[in-house]
Amino acid sequence: MVMGLSTAYSPAGSRLVAPTPLAAGAAPRRRRRSSLRPLLATVRCSVDGAATVAAEAPASRKDCFGVFCTTYDLKAEDKTRSWKKLVSIAVSGAAGMISNHLLFKLASGEVFGQDQPIALKLLGSERSFQALEGVAMELEDSLYPLLREVSIGIDPYEVFEDVDWALLIGAKPRGPGMERAALLDINGQIFADQGKALNTVASPNVKVVVVGNPCNTNALICLKNAPRIPAKNFHALTRLDENRAKCQLALKAGVFYDKVSNMTIWGNHSTTQVPDFLNAKIDGRPVKEVIKDTKWLEEEFTMTVQKRGGVLIQKWGRSSAASTAVSIVDAIRSLVTPTPEGDWFSSGVYTTGNPYGIAEDIVFSMPCRSKGDGDYELASDVLMDDFLWERIKKSEAELLAEKKCVAHLTGEGNAFCDLPEDTMLPGEM
Ligand SMILES: NC(=O)C1=CN([C@@H]2O[C@H](COP(=O)(O)OP(=O)(O)OC[C@H]3O[C@@H](n4cnc5c(N)ncnc54)[C@H](OP(=O)(O)O)[C@@H]3O)[C@@H](O)[C@H]2O)C=CC1
Ligand SMILES: O=C([O-])CC(=O)C(=O)O
């Protein structure tokens, strides 16, 4: 019997890898891509494993790339296996540097688990389309057993269809002499459009991680343009900042960094961000008990974390890509696995209803805990002192000013852009 399956195909030996079965006789998922790569061929394997290649009408299956267009029969033993439902992940800026690390981590199973098949839907632009094909070819050649579908496209309304996760990485980098207000406007437009597309075609409970800078305000724009999706589902990536802070504390205390817990980054992913050494712990003890040098904590530690991205750019000549990809993995894993007892993680999330007194209706990094179901709650057992609160207010003021700059993109009237000072992304100092 031949069943329609979406799967990876390895011609050598006709390896049949963990297919995602369609119910017998069921029609394949709706496919109506026009800007996606045309179908190359369909490969069908019979029960005894002999492959036959048959040309298939391109109109019927366009949203797949190369080998990911193959169709399989089940081997007898696979018929009795049950596989988790496919998780569909859209990645924008998929031909960029961060994605070049991230996509292979997603495909390897290290993010969603070794028993979780995934589909990758890569969003690029006309400018990056060829590079996107190159990325998809490398994914083909990697023979990842859990990677069942890969598609590429330039229209977010097509690429985001039915996705469970949207990792929004693509954004214009701030060029020399460009005002932050201009960057907010150009990138804000991208995230307004992508928010509308998610609102229209994504899974209603899609989780959205905004990485493209300025990520907090981009996330706010995105969620405002996607009223069908719970605002709680939108995250701005501040996990890289958390990881950087943990590394600095471990270094100073002379411990391995897995000993550092409860590390919060408060606020904006910018140089006003607040790495919180009041609540962080080393080996279960308050940081201030272990590192008694308060001046170092208030000055050097704080500044090192705030400006780490910029120092790295000076060394590398480009911004953090591998460590950002790692932090995206950490951020997703923190939502799909239960938070260790007593610990928490940082994410830039929607402030409305927050218990700390931070202004409502912005996206602000705060301490979160998850049961592993993709959702999170804000931690309530946090300490606050004047030093911490004063700095939180500064980052809050920056985000409120950024919000005014993008009012035309959030449906809140005319934009009025008067940033208190021309604050920097971590990579810009
Ligand atoms: N939150 C965080 O912790 C971090 C965030 N970042 C941010 O992540 C984003 C991506 O970084 P990275 O992958 O290194 O960057 P790259 O320059 O390698 O890739 C960025 C991608 O953005 C897309 N893009 C969208 N619009 C434009 C535009 N108008 N002009 C140029 N490119 C555009 C391009 O893809 P295409 O043509 O396909 O659209 C490009 O491939 C940046 O905004 C960066 O500042 C970086 C590090 C940490
Ligand atoms: O400014 C950038 O693109 C880099 C950045 O966000 C960081 O390193 O944290």
Image (cartoon, helix red, strand yellow):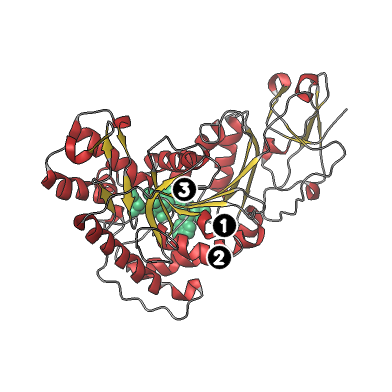
Report whether 285 appears left or right of 71.
left
Tell me which label, 1 or 3, sits earlier in the chain.
3
Graded by Cα atoms within 10 Å as few (under 14), some (14 to 19) or many (20 or more), the crowding at tag 3 reads some
Residue 238 picture location, percent across and down = 38, 49
Residue 375 picture location, percent across and down = 52, 47
Say above or below: 12 vs 190.
above
User: Nearer the observer, disc 1 or disc 2?
Assistant: 2
Tell me how far mark 1 sits from mark 2, CA to CA: 16 Å
Say which quadrant the C terminus sits in.
bottom left
Determine the residue positioned at 79% across, 22% down: 75
Q: Tag 3: residue type?
A: Gly
Determine the residue positioned at 71% across, 54% down: 33
User: Nearer the observer, disc 1 or disc 3?
Assistant: 3
Q: Residue at label 2?
A: 193
Dots 1 and 3: beta carbons under 8 Å? no
Report whether 241 appears left or right of 171.
left
Q: Residue at label 3?
A: 96
Q: Residue at label 1?
A: 126
Indicate yes or no: mark 3 CB to ligand 1 under 8 Å.
yes
